[in-house]
Amino acid sequence: MIECNQNPPLVQDLAQLLNQSRDPVDIKRLMNHEPGLEEWELPLVDLCGLSSENEEERVSCASEICKASSELGFFQIVNHGISLDLLRNMRKEQVKLFKVPFEQKTSSGLLDNSYRWGNRTATCPKQLSWCEAFHVPLSKISDHTCYGEFNSLREVMQEYANAMQELAKSIAGVLVANMGAQRGGWEDNCNASTCFMRLNRYPPCPISPELFGLVPHTDSDFLTILHQDEHVGGLQLMKDSKWVAVKPNPDALVVNIGDLFQVYFL
């Protein structure tokens, strides 16, 4: 089977893991996506309330953020201050980047050599993620040497990263001020040396259309702000001991409370 040269060698990786596996493998058991999965809408928070002149509206908005964070750990935000034009431009640049030949993505030093695919530590097929990604430290976003010929990518990534970092600080500030944290230092989790920007792509799988994405996991960081693909969707979360699909909202960003945040407030 021949893959387009822009795609990582996930087929070969899966074949190798299948050959190494001593137990019979049911391909359906490997699927991260379940057909007919219930679609669910996340709590929606309008961030306009945070900047309102009305104190009651500010308090109410902060309360919504804290409630969603503590009860579910996921919520969507609208009127977040990041323009739709910037989100569209970032998506356009990301599509161009991932169309680069696989060999160039792995060997040209793009984005601080941060290109990864699949799961290099997988020891069995069910641990293999059908994805590729750039996981870039914010401290490297402005480094000219990371971009090579992709000049327009650098400009958009800088603007996007700066906007997302300010948004993350705003949300984190609300949570710290309203959830009873007794110690400082949370700012250390929201600076360029500790934050990352992750660009994800989930290539089509020729084996099964459902075998794609990331294996079940929790985010280990403080918090994640996600711009979900509103056309494809694909985000799933565990709710009441079952997986549900998150309904995309083209006007919203998704906020995910991470493990580090939970430890901070325990």
Image (cartoon, rainbow, N blue to C red):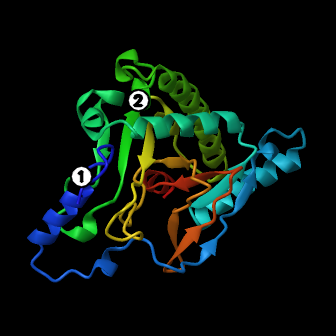
Q: Residue 26, percent across and down?
A: 26, 82
Q: Is residue 197 left or right of residue 61?
A: left
Which sits in the foreground, 141 or 174?
141
**Identity, as a three-letter code, of the amino acid under mark 2:** Ser
For image coordinates 21% across by 53% down, the residue present is 120
Q: Residue 37, percent across and down?
A: 54, 78
Q: Which mark is nearer the camera, 1 or 2?
A: 1
Number of marks in picture: 2
- The secondary element bearing badge 1 is classed as loop
Q: Mark 1 Cα within 10 Å, few/some/many (few <14, many 20+)?
A: some
Q: Is residue 36 above or below residue 154?
A: below
For image coordinates 52% across by 43% down, the residue present is 183
Q: Is residue 240 visible?
A: yes
The residue sitting at the front extreme is 2
Q: Mark 2 Cα within 10 Å, few/some/many (few <14, many 20+)?
A: few
Q: Is residue 9 above or below residue 161?
A: below
Q: Which residue is mark 1?
A: 9
Q: Is residue 224 above or below residue 84?
A: below
For image coordinates 37% across by 40% down, the residue present is 134
The label on residue 60 is: none
Residue 115 in which image quadrant: top left
Q: Earlier in the sequence, mark 1 or mark 2?
A: 1
Residue 202 in which image quadrant: bottom left
Q: Which residue is mark 2?
A: 193
**Identity, as a three-letter code, of the amino acid under mark 1:** Pro
Q: Residue 110, percent across and down?
A: 33, 29
Which sits in the foreground, 52 or 34?
34
Q: Residue 68, percent across and down?
A: 65, 61
